[in-house]
Image: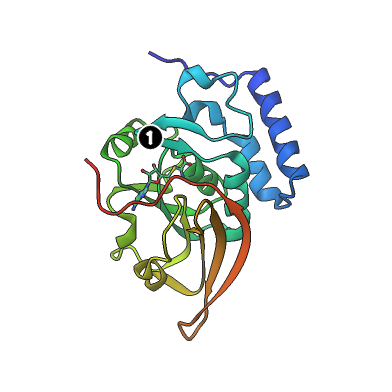
Amino acid sequence: MRVFEDTYRHKGLRKKLVDLLRSKGITDEKVLTAINNIPRHFFLDSAFDEIAYEDKAFPIGEGQTISQPYTVAYQTQLLQIKPFDKVLEIGTGSIYQSSVLAEMGANVCTIERQKKLYDKTKQFIFKSKYPNIKFFYGDGYEGLPTYAPFDKVIITAGAPFIPPKLIQQLKPGGKMVIPVDEGHHQRMLRITKNADGSTYEEAFENFSFVPMLTGKNG
Ligand code: SAH
């Protein structure tokens, strides 16, 4: 059985990663602290132990990837997370992004469409540390109507369009951060829902995500 160890070396590499994220423009100290607190190498196969703190996406099986730390930090910063925010995440993947949100005190509902990745969440190493993460197997385009409305929604796969049901499930005053396809890359958008239900959109940097697919795979 794999032994999970967070050594001084890992901690040192993690601190360097946090410094790198800061130099790339991440300013939210709460986001940087969460990244500094979470052993990213625990979320990857042991083969990645030495490189887990490079600012890169890595494979996690089923053709999917753990997002690049910069991307995780960027999306989380745009969400303006407050403790007890009710957050819906589409694309659980490795659970790393969910853990960053949970570490910041959010209550997270996360949906994964790949059955094999969803099944892995049953052995999540930080289950008792983050009881504020709930896992769902399903199609993110549908959201979670029974748990709605949410303060924040984050999509961690490249969306061909803004899913209308996810806008519906956002609270008035709530924010959604979503990478939307523009051909060969995705543009990061932040959508804020006004009190009257109308929305406004802000556009940020371009990123490269695995696609947000329809239906469940299992
Ligand atoms: N947040 C993840 C990133 C995973 S990559 C992490 O921190 O590791 C994106 C994930 O979105 C993949 O696991 C993929 O299977 C999932 N996905 C893609 N389309 C989806 C959909 N419609 N509903 C739910 N999950 C989806």
- Among all residues in the image, which is located at the extreme right? 23
- Among all residues in the image, which is located at the extreme bottom? 196
Q: Nearer the viewer, residue 206 or 150?
A: 206
The residue singled out by tag 1 in the image is 63
Can residue 174 be seen?
yes
Q: Residue at x 71, y 42 (%)?
A: 21
Is label 1 in a helix, a strand or a loop?
A: loop
Q: Is residue 116 above or below residue 150?
A: above
Colour setup of the view: rainbow
Picture quadrant where residue 23 is located: top right
Q: Residue at x 37, y 70 (%)?
A: 164
Q: Nearer the viewer, residue 155 or 13?
A: 155
Q: Position of residue 7 (x, y in %)?
A: 62, 18
Q: Amino acid at mark 1?
A: Gly
Q: Residue at x 64, y 22 (%)?
A: 10
Q: Is residue 136 above or below residue 84?
A: above
- Among all residues in the image, which is located at the extreme top? 1
Picture quadrant where residue 61 is located: top left
Q: Nearer the viewer, residue 207 or 172?
A: 207
Q: Position of residue 81 (x, y in %)?
A: 58, 58
Can residue 128 be seen?
no
Q: Is residue 99 left or right of residue 113?
A: right
Q: Is residue 47 above or below residue 133?
A: above
